[in-house]
Image: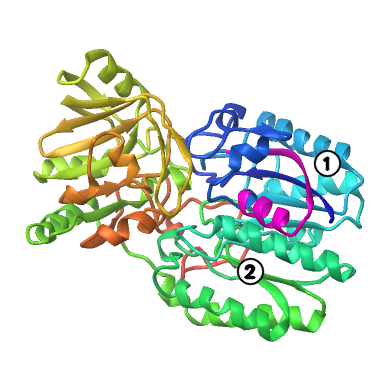
Amino acid sequence: MARIIIGGFQHETNTFAPSKATLEAFTSPGSWPALVTGAPLFDAVKGINISVAGFIGEARRLGHELVPTSWAAASPSAHVTDEAFEHIAGLIVAGVKAALPADALYLCLHGAMVTESFEDGEGELIRRIREVTGPDLPILASLDLHANVTPEMVARADGLDAYRTYPHIDMAETGARVARTLDARLKSGSSKPARAFEQIPFLMPLVRQCTMAEPAGRLYGMIPAIEAEHNVTLAFATGFPAADIYHCGASVFAYGEDDVCVKLAVKQLVDAINAVEAEFAAQLPDPDTAVREAMRIAATADKPVVIADVQDNSGGGGDSDTTGLLRALISNGAEGAAIGLIVDPAAAEAAHAAGVGAEITLGLGGKSKVPGDAPYDGTFRVEALSDGQFTATGPFYSGSHMRLGLSARLSIGGVQIVVGSRKVQMADRMMYRFLGIEPEAMKILGNKSSVHYRADFAPIAAEIIECAAPGPVLADPGALPWKHLRPGLRVRPLGEPFGG
């Protein structure tokens, strides 16, 4: 039995997004548990598809003693405020100090956190922990597939591993895999591992990082065989291409016993990725074109057509309140359509005040003032009301206790609208059902999500159409106003290099 300290701090930062992650964003639960410290951490994450839960379950199965510090997560947004970072990092570091001596430490991280003061939030957190533990305590961490991994993160940790699916249906499994890696490391008594790290020279659009499609599917499928061939742990992080930092972008990294083997493993996967750069390019239709195509397909389909509003994805930093796709559904006369989640606390409150069956006139959404977007002014019928609490059932959010705040189903013409008060990516069918919409019965579903919706909606979809309505999570990273990327990095597949 080993004594293992655990903790976590997760945030995916879109530096172009309209709203920052304050401390309240981490202390108010939405789709993930709120900030938790000490023993309550175990119950807070139990049964949820997140890495720390997978690590806890597997480490306990292997017979280890776990000492919790703190764990926190918030929906993707702009920078984590200094107040939030200092408070949560302080809790974790203090918890680590109090838990020593120990045999190892595990961190549940994202890998793409940018704070008001630090481009590399995770690297800074590990640095502070190292000041307390010293250089010899093994520190291993799980990362999101979208991590913008830095050389400092690789150097300061003794093992990093990342999700291998997008949609992230393997978050808990990744934590369990790290637990097995750590267990093997402790049993072997091996010294500091060899490591290798290489960054990919182009940014990958989020919509082309999906492992349910190519080229990502076959690239991730290569990892187990390369690991076995070279006796290493190997990871591929596709990066989060909306963080204006020096180390933004995809990378490949490996840890093992032999310097030559880790370098060969990384090179093998990097060469395969670079060979299919052109396949990562993305061009998406505007919302009117997408809606008209969806209506054409839906006229004869026996399943709903899903339109993904990929650029207002709260999972990528959007506020989930733009109205481009909503306008297109209404203006084109779509029938049997539903769209969600539109986050507008004032509209939800107005619906609750008016009651079911009432009509309310208001400007819906558009509060984040994204260029090219505005509130949709109209008269809506209140169809259903909810406190926004339910349990997700799909593969991505599996087991998560959703708390969307005051919520309402509004209708206008042939369109049903799911309105909530807290932003959560539309990636679970229960996010329609909790307000009385049966997704399978609709002709068109407009989901504010880039890829995660596919896990629960692809099985019921006649077809999926991605569209580019106004939003802060641009499908083409080359269209963003970059300032701080490393010189030479191509801002889109086969695109122009950043000049610095």
Q: Position of residue 476 (x, y in %)?
A: 41, 59
Residue 265 covered by magenta stretch: no
Q: Amino acid at mark 2?
A: Ala
Give the quadrant of the C terminus.
Answer: bottom right
Residue drawn at (43%, 31%) of the image: 422
Taking the image as drawn, is residue 193 in sight?
yes
What is the span of residues highlighted in magenta in the rendered image?
A: 53-73
Residue drawn at (74%, 78%) of the image: 262
Q: Amino acid at mark 1?
A: Val
Residue farthest along the bottom direction in this orientation? 229
Residue 62 covered by magenta stretch: yes
Residue linked to disc 1: 96
Residue drawn at (77%, 56%) of the image: 63
Residue linked to disc 2: 235
Check the image and report above or below for 468 versus 118: below
Q: Position of residue 141 (x, y in %)?
A: 71, 56
Give the quadrant of the N terminus.
Answer: bottom right
Q: Position of residue 38 (x, y in %)?
A: 73, 34
Q: Tell how many labels.
A: 2
- Between the C-alphas of marks 2 and 1, the distance is 26 Å
Estimate how packed mark 1 is, as few (under 14), some (14 to 19) or many (20 or more) residues with alpha carbons within 10 Å. Answer: many
The answer to whether residue 83 is left or right of residue 201 is: right
Residue drawn at (52%, 32%) of the image: 29
The answer to whether residue 291 is left or right of residue 62 is: left
Give the quadrant of residue 140.
Answer: bottom right
Check the image and report above or below for 308 versus 318: below
**SS for dot 1:** helix
The answer to whether residue 105 is left or right of residue 357 is: right
The foreground one among 360 and 1 is 1
Taking the image as drawn, is residue 486 in sight?
no
